[in-house]
Image: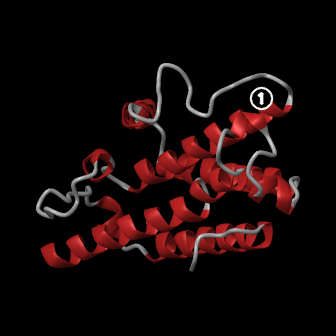
Amino acid sequence: MARPTTKADLMEAANSNFESLKEFIASMTEQELTTSFDFSKDEKKKEAHWQRDKNLRDILIHLYEWHRLTLEWVRANQKGEAKPFLPKPYNWKTYGQMNVFFWKKHQNTSLEEAKEMLEESHQEIMQLAEKFSNDELFSKGVFDWVGGSALGSYFVSNTSSHYAWAVKKLKAHRKNCKAGA
C-alpha cells in the first residue's frame, strides 16, 4: 500500500495495518512468543532496533511510546504550548537513545499490559486524527509547530508505517524460529 496522502487513506491504512498486526500476533506460536529475538546472524539488519527489541512486548511498547509522543505533542501545541515533537534532551540525531530509554522503562511491563496500552493508544491516536480535516492533515504550513512537514505525516509514521515495520520484524522473528527448529 502506498503511503497515505489523504485523511481517508490515513484512517484506512492505520486501521488496516493495526488489524494486520493484531492478526499476526494472534497467529504467533508459543515458541515464537517465548523465543528471544536474535537477528545477529543477518548482516542486513544493521539498524539499532534489530538489537534493541528482544520480544513482542518490546515492539508493542515502542509503538505505544511513539503514539504517546504524537498525542502529547499535538495536544500541547493545540493548547498553545510550544512543544517539540521529541522531548528534551533528544533530537532527530539522538532519538535512538530515546528508544533505548523507552525500552528500559518498560522491562517490567507485561505482554498483556503492553497489548492493552497499545490498543488504548491506537484508539486515542485515531480519535485525534479524526478531529482534523484533510487539509489540516495533509497541507504543509497549516500549523506553525509542525515545521515544513504536514501534520498527517506524523500520524502516518506513527500508525500505519510503524505497524507495517512491526509486522516485518515479527515475520523476520518467525523465520528465525523456523530456521532454528
Q: In the picture provided, is 144 more to the left or to the right than 1?
A: right
Q: Residue at x 65, y 44 (%)?
A: 148
108 up-or-down from 59: above or below = above
73 up-or-down from 29: above or below = above
Front residue of this view, candidates 3 and 160: 3
Occupied quadrant, residue 16: bottom right
Q: In the picture provided, is 82 more to the left or to the right than 48?
A: right
Give the residue number, with chain letter if any, for mark 1: 76
| Amino acid identity at mark 1 | Ala
> Is residue 178 visible in this depiction of the protein?
yes
Q: In the picture provided, is 77 more to the left or to the right than 17?
A: right
Front residue of this view, candidates 72 and 176: 72
Q: In which quarter of the image is the N terminus?
A: bottom right
* Residue 66 image position (x, y, % from top left): 56, 44
39 up-or-down from 9: above or below = above
Q: In the picture provided, is 41 more to the left or to the right than 94?
A: left
* Residue 173 image position (x, y, % from top left): 29, 67
Q: Residue at x 54, y 48 (%)?
A: 114
* Residue 43 image position (x, y, % from top left): 13, 62
> Is residue 181 visible in this depiction of the protein?
no
Front residue of this view, candidates 135 and 171: 135
